[in-house]
Image (tube, coloured by chain):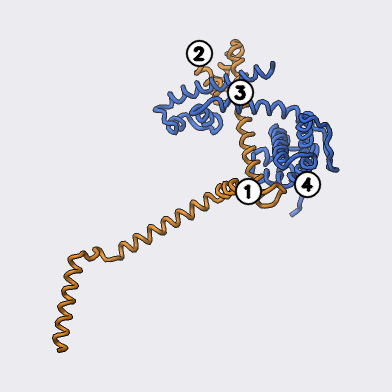
Chain colours: A blue, B orange
Amino acid sequence: MVLKTDQLKPDSSEKALLQGLARNDKKAVETIYKDNYNLVQALVVNNSGTSDDAKDIFQEAMVVLYEKVQSGTFELNCQIKTFIYSVSKRLWLKRLMQQNRFSISDGHAESVSVDEEMEEHEKRDTEFTMMERAMNGLGEPCKSLLEAFYLQKKSMQEIASSFGYTNSENAKNQKYKCLMRLKKLFFSQYKNESL
Amino acid sequence: MEDIKLIEAVERYISGQMSPDERVYFEQLRKTNAEVDQMVVEHTFFLQQMNRFDDVKNLKATLNETHIHLGEKGLIKAPRLKGKAKVVYLYNRYKKVTAIAASIAGITALTISALVWSLSPGKPANKQDIENLSRDIRNINQKVSQVQK
């Protein structure tokens, strides 16, 4: 059997990892985590952070990477390590700036510009928080009802029987009311946000 | 059209569940009715927001699990769990194993007690029987001692 040389290149295994991450595959997440966490922890801890800060920063950088691969491109213009490190540095610097500190001393690890990704992430992070608030403000059983239909993709019949509605028509009406409430809760924050 | 019916139609349109005819009709409706058009745009955006929220929430859960797991295995330099948090971690991690072990233990206990019950003599001797028995023994003893004399 002839092995193609590009299968041996590190970027093809990196691509597989990114594809795994896009699917929230536990193995891929674990591998990326294992290979990159210590570098980020060293960066944060050496710049007056705690290991809890390091965990927050690293995990947020993973979310940024996830958002990037969600768009369907599994090729970074740099290694995963460089990307995570660069994002983490930006995230940690931002936290430090909130405490009036403006510089960071990093090791000799390579980094790249991640301006675009940071901008996109900030927007998405705001949206995440808004949806979280809206969902939490909704209360039960509305929250579970909408999750069952829109996220777990259960049928109205299944939902009716598991929530104890006498028929799927009633469940459908209730779902509609819940959806309208959730949309109202979500979009009202949008108006406040843009002001 | 009622709002609930309209939302349902919009959702079927977005997810591609409409028949070709219905789709043509709905697209025509979008063109002529700005309100319907706006509803499609808004609802598409909203559903995307819900899905993104769920995806990131699930990823965050995976990340937290991974952090604890790698930390406990010593594969990253994170501080290990202490006290209560550790018990919770171990409990969650070995919940299944514990549940299986417990049910095997339960089944074994039931089997053994069933066996013991089925193999042991039906009725325990009651008081009357014991008295009768001891009277018999007394009689025998008396007879034996008479013979010996």
- The amino acid marked with disc number 3 is Phe
> Which residue is labeled 2 in the image?
B1
**Chain of the residue under label 2:** B
Vertically, is B35 above or below A18? above
Q: Nearer the viewer, residue B39 or A83?
A: A83
Q: Distance of mark 2 from mark 1, alpha carbons?
A: 60 Å
Left or right of A59 on screen, residue A144:
left
Tag nearer the camera, 2 or 3? 3
**Chain of the residue under label 3:** B
Contact (Cβ within 8 Å) of mark 1 with mark 3: no
- The amino acid marked with disc number 4 is Pro
Mark sitting earlier along the chain (2/3): 2
In which quarter of the view is residue A95 placed?
top right
Q: Nearer the viewer, residue B148 or A186?
A: B148
> Which residue is labeled 1 in the image?
B82
Dot 2 falls on a residue whose secondary structure is loop
> Which residue is labeled 4 in the image?
A10
- The amino acid marked with disc number 1 is Lys
Residue visible at 17% across and 84% down? B144
